[in-house]
Image: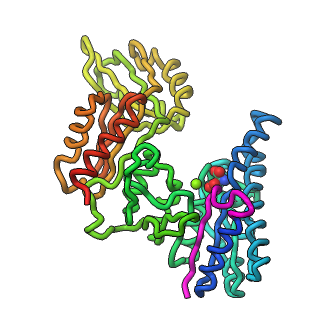
Amino acid sequence: MGLVVQKFGGSSVANTERIRNVASIIADTYKAGNNVVVVLSAQGDTTDDLIAKAQEINPHASKREMDMLLSTGEQISVSLCAMALEGMGFPVVSLTGWQAGIRTNSAYGSARIKRVVSERILAELDRRSIVIVTGFQGINKYDDITTLGRGGSDTSAVALAAALHADLCQIYTDVDGVYTADPRIVPDARKLEEITYDEMLELASLGAQVLHNRSVELAKQYNVNLEVVSSFTRQPGTKVKEVVKTVEKLHVSGVAKDTKIARIALVGLLDQPGIAYKVFSLLAKKGINVDIILQSIGRDETKDISFTISKSDLETARTALEEAQESLGYDHMTISDSVAKVSIVGAGMANNPGVAATMFEALYNGSINIHMISTSEIKVSVLVDVADADRAVQVVHEKFFSEFGR
Ligand code: ASP
Ligand code: MG
């Protein structure tokens, strides 16, 4: 007998019929002799609807009250699902994050799980109950409800799987696995049987919205056996693990696109030591993450520095940099938010020269202009015009998956 944690996303529990479907997946897992802990998201668009309601009442509501409100969506799903299983004759109990012992730090709206006090869950499992826990939430040291950030239920599931030493953590969603590219952009994208934690982390942060980033970090840290699978097809999904079988080791595992970014260029900075330090420590103080950075030689003993940040940080960055224009001593700033980052990710890239060149060749053949480039051991990213982004994904995917493909 094993312990399985199963997480179902909002679309998998969107209505009564789908909750029944989820209940029957849970029931089958239980009947196979497993202990089952289930984590659910809020139904369908519930979280968005709750946010809209809050906006109507008070657009500046405190984060504490937002968490109080948003955590209710998950309570609805878990109780309904428990009722479905009760109706089918199974022993079952639903628990809030608090009842399940999920303790977080105090950052309302983006809390991090610090530990899981698992006594209650273990006691329920001892009684052979199915345990259904609200995703996306916990409590902090003030006994206040906190939420983990949008998409955080994946992280709840992985944290529970780690704390309970589960044999498997299945993330059920409306896609049946991790693909080599977004199938809406590349119709012949393929489903990967396996992918490494590191590749998955890169893909998640690059905008392939399959798993919450933090959940993959946790899975890697605690070596949780993770699987992405569809609640609709019940077909084998994609396994996320430390090392993948060699047959699966493609040079490139996926092509991703991120359009939620903006580029800032500071033109005419003095060419002297300490300038980069001043610019980026200013941004760091504002809590702004900087991604691709490019420094180039400008005119007359000056230099230019351009970099990308998340679009949501653009206004904060703009204001901070404008205020500091004199002390930083740049001539002017240009901003573009019509850019996108297109990236290839692959653990096999590190030992195979020419991967980046192949990507650039594909973009060249597609007459797509590259504004910036950045690389890491397992990733090559380019910044392109947002208008070119989908086509960039297509030509790059075509190049890698018809030449190097299996
Ligand atoms: N319900 C939350 C959201 O919509 C958490 C989740 O679905 O993972 O972001
Ligand atoms: Mg999700």
> Residues in magenta?
1-18
Q: Position of residue 189 (x, y in %)?
A: 38, 52
Q: The N terminus lies in which quarter of the figure?
A: bottom right
Q: Position of residue 141 (x, y in %)?
A: 71, 59
Closer to the camera, 182 or 353?
182
For image coordinates 64% across by 56% down, the residue present is 11
For image coordinates 43% across by 36% down, the residue present is 290
> Which quadrant of the figure has residue 173?
bottom right
View extreme (right): residue = 57
Residue 5 included in the magenta stretch of the image = yes
- Residue 135 higher or lower than 26, as above or below: above
Q: Inspect this view and state whether residue 224 appears.
A: yes
Q: Position of residue 38 (x, y in %)?
A: 64, 71
Q: Position of residue 161 (x, y in %)?
A: 56, 72
- Residue 239 higher or lower than 336, as above or below: below
Q: Is residue 187 left or right of residue 158?
A: left
> Which quadrant of the figure has residue 240?
bottom left
Closer to the camera, 274 or 19?
19
